[in-house]
Image (cartoon, coloured by chain):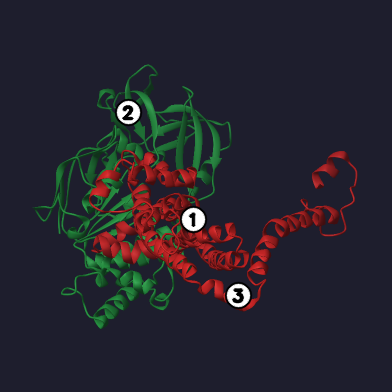
Chain colours: A green, B red
């Protein structure tokens, strides 16, 4: 089922959580709403779910206007950041809940419910924990139960609010890959909210980057990462160095200008440290810190105009260079992204 | 201690017994415990003992007779009626009010919270007088009520009203912190799964607050049965008609019928003891429910 939101505005008191937001989610797509806290992503998700109502604007499912409908009538599966499992019910009862509360006519038989729940337990790989209570489960297990519970009612769309936000780093990565696999099997239109760029870029078909109640850019992970439309998107997706200045000449040398100039963004791995410039556009810097634990070596240097610059390189390059602290080097930008000052 | 010794360069002797840092000497411990026990003995156990001693002073038969006396029976009946009406009404009211306060934002919320506490802060005698001023013959609605032959003051309805007023904070007070701690995500989840409002309430909300609710009901009931001041003002003390147990006890005592007075009093004391036992059992469960909610919330906080 496709989702369309049009000109959605939502205010909490004086604070505009959403400011004229429009976007489309195609049927069967897995879309991430990515943004910092307070960017309105969760509010947008809750408005799609019907847990919150917009001040103005419309929500459509498959072209049908459902703006005024309650959560109950929208047939959405909602997964809460903090699981919101029913704490007095077992895992089995939690998953069965949505089927058991159906009106008598639409309610499946006991055997059908049991079969459905066991099918879902198998899907989330928790068959042997059916009789546990939520408090006896780990965070990752709880989140999977919450997902199974949402899927039990065969929702038309699946909405996930920071689904992995409360989990520790390792479980998070496992679970998001599992979610991607699940989506490839089930093909249900899904929207999930996250503030974690890695999560959004790795899992989703398309990413909507949000900031201050607006959608800054919607696109595939590759598009938003490589061709960011606004400085905010560039800044938010991945680490970045920001310079104020102008770019001059064919070689695109950075001329620093404190008083104004354009905004120049360079990703740390697109800066190269060398001892000699060999005629390429460069600026001078001094090595200040070296962090070599991890797959990449992160070097912090001080540019000739005093600003800190972050550079990333492979362990191999680092070994070849034999950098030491306080060494004078030259830095060559391989790729720059320039935003005119007035575009910000 | 380790830092102190290393700083001063001296080696301090560590106490040999495994005594915690906050441990007191044996003398202090015994003195404090002794004082507490003595206080409890004089002010609580002794009076309680005397109630029962006096009740049985003239033997079991006399005790039994004073309980079976028609006026005593009617007082018991009236007490049960008053509590039987006040407690369920306050249960419904308490849940509704607590729900509104904990789950919604609305104008006048803090006023409502304050009003719920009013019966706690107002003297019960004053609460009784409010009803007399409202429904009494010289009261605001008195003439109208008299014309329609409705009697509230010096009759059972007045007693029930006074009891409701005095006991209405108990359930709400107990539930508000519990509901606030639990938030409303579970209810939202239930709604999203297609449950109706009532299904959500009975299947999700109520099970989550049941121990706190029971605790509130027990306290409410104990107070409803034991209330003296407010009921005394509106009752008129008509024997066999508008006397509740506490009022009956007072009358008997004023007439020097000590055995009868203490016999009925022993019933109230027994009620109090039973309430205490049930209360501590339920309180333990309720605390655990609140602690569970807190822990549940705490785990969320680790995000």
Image position, residue B76 (x, y; %): 46, 67
- Whether callout 2 and callout 3 share a subunit is answered no
Residue found 22% across the figure and 44% down from its top: A218
**Would residue B170 appear left or right of A39 to someone viewing this image?**
right
* Disc assigned to residue B227: 1
Image quadrant assignment for residue B61: bottom right
Image position, residue A168 (x, y; %): 47, 56
Image quadrant assignment for residue B264: bottom right
Q: Real-space Cα distance between discs 2 and 3?
A: 113 Å
**The C terminus of chain A lies in quadrant:** top left
Q: Can residue A79 be seen in this view?
A: no
Crowding at mark 3 (Cα within 10 Å: few <14, some 14-19, many 20+) = some
Q: Which residue lies furthest to the bottom in this view?
A: A111
Q: Residue furthest top?
A: A259
- Whether callout 1 and callout 2 share a subunit is answered no
**Would residue A316 appear left or right of B184 to someone viewing this image?**
right
Q: Where is B260 relative to A252, above or below?
A: below
Q: Are discs 2 and 3 less than 8 Å apart at CB? A: no
Q: Real-space Cα distance between discs 3 and 1?
A: 26 Å
For numbered disc 3, what is the local secondary structure? helix
**The N terminus of chain A lies in quadrant:** bottom left
Q: Mark 2 points at which residue?
A: A251
């Amino acid at each position: 089922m496709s989702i369309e939101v049009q000109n959605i505005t939502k205010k909490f008191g004086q604070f505009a959580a959403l400011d004229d937001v429009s976007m489309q989610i195609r049927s069967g797509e897995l879309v991430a709403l990515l943004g910092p806290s307070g960017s309105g992503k969760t509010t947008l998700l809750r408005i799609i779910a019907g847990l919150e109502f917009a001040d103005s604007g419309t929500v459509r499912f498959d072209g049908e206007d459902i703006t005024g409908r309650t959560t109950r009538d929208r047939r959405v599966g909602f997964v809460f950041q903090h699981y919101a499992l029913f704490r007095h019910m077992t895992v089995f009862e939690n998953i069965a809940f949505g089927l058991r509360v159906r009106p008598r006519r639409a309610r499946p038989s006991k055997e059908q419910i049991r079969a459905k729940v066991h099918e879902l337990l198998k899907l989330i790989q928790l068959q042997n924990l059916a009789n546990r209570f939520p408090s006896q489960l780990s965070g990752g297990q709880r989140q999977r139960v919450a997902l199974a519970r949402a899927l039990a009612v065969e929702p038309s769309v699946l909405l996930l609010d920071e689904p992995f936000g409360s989990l520790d780093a390792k479980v998070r990565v496992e679970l998001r890959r599992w979610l991607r696999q699940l989506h490839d099997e089930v093909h249900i239109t899904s929207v999930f909210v996250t503030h974690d760029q890695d999560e959004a870029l790795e899992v989703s078909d398309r990413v909507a980057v949000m900031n201050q109640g607006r959608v800054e850019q919607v696109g595939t992970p590759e598009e938003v990462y490589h061709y960011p439309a606004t400085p905010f998107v560039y800044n938010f997706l991945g680490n970045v160095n920001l310079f104020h200045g102008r770019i001059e000449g064919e070689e695109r040398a950075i001329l620093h200008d404190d008083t104004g100039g354009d905004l120049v963004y360079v990703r740390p791995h697109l800066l190269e440290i060398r001892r000699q410039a060999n005629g390429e556009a460069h600026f001078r810097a001094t090595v200040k810190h070296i962090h070599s634990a991890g797959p990449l070596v992160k070097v912090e240097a001080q540019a000739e105009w005093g600003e800190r610059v972050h550079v990333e390189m492979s362990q191999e390059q680092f070994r070849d260079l034999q950098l030491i602290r306080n060494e004078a080097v030259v830095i060559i930008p391989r790729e720059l992204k320039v935003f005119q000052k007035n575009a910000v | 201690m380790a830092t102190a010794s290393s700083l001063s360069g001296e080696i301090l002797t560590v106490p040999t017994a495994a005594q915690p840092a906050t441990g007191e000497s044996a003398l202090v411990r015994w003195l404090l415990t002794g004082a507490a026990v003595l206080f409890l003995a004089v002010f609580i156990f002794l009076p309680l003992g005397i109630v029962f001693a006096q009740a049985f002073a003239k033997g079991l038969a006399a005790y039994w007779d004073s309980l079976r006396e028609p006026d005593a029976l009617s007082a018991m009946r009236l007490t049960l009626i008053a509590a039987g009406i006040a407690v369920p009404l306050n249960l419904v009211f308490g849940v509704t009010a607590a729900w509104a306060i904990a789950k919604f934002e609305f104008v006048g919320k803090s006023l409502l919270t304050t009003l719920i506490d009013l019966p706690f802060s107002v003297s019960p005698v004053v609460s009784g007088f409010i009803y007399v001023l409202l429904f009494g013959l010289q009261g605001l609605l008195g003439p109208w009520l008299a014309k329609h032959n409705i009697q509230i003051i010096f009759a059972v309805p007045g007693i029930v009203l006074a009891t409701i007023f005095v006991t209405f904070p108990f359930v709400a007070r107990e539930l508000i912190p519990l509901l606030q701690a639990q938030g409303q995500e579970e209810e939202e989840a239930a709604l999203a799964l297609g449950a109706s409002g009532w299904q959500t309430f009975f299947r999700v909300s109520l099970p989550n607050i049941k121990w706190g609710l029971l605790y509130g009901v027990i306290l409410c009931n104990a107070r409803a049965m034991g209330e003296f001041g407010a009921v005394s003002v509106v009752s008129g003390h008509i024997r066999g008609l508008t006397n509740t147990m506490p009022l009956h006890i007072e009358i008997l005592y004023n007439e020097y019928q000590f055995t009868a007075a203490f016999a009925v009093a022993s019933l109230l004391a027994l009620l109090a003891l039973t309430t205490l036992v049930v209360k501590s059992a339920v309180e333990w469960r309720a605390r655990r429910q609140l602690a569970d909610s807190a822990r549940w919330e705490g785990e969320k906080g680790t995000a």
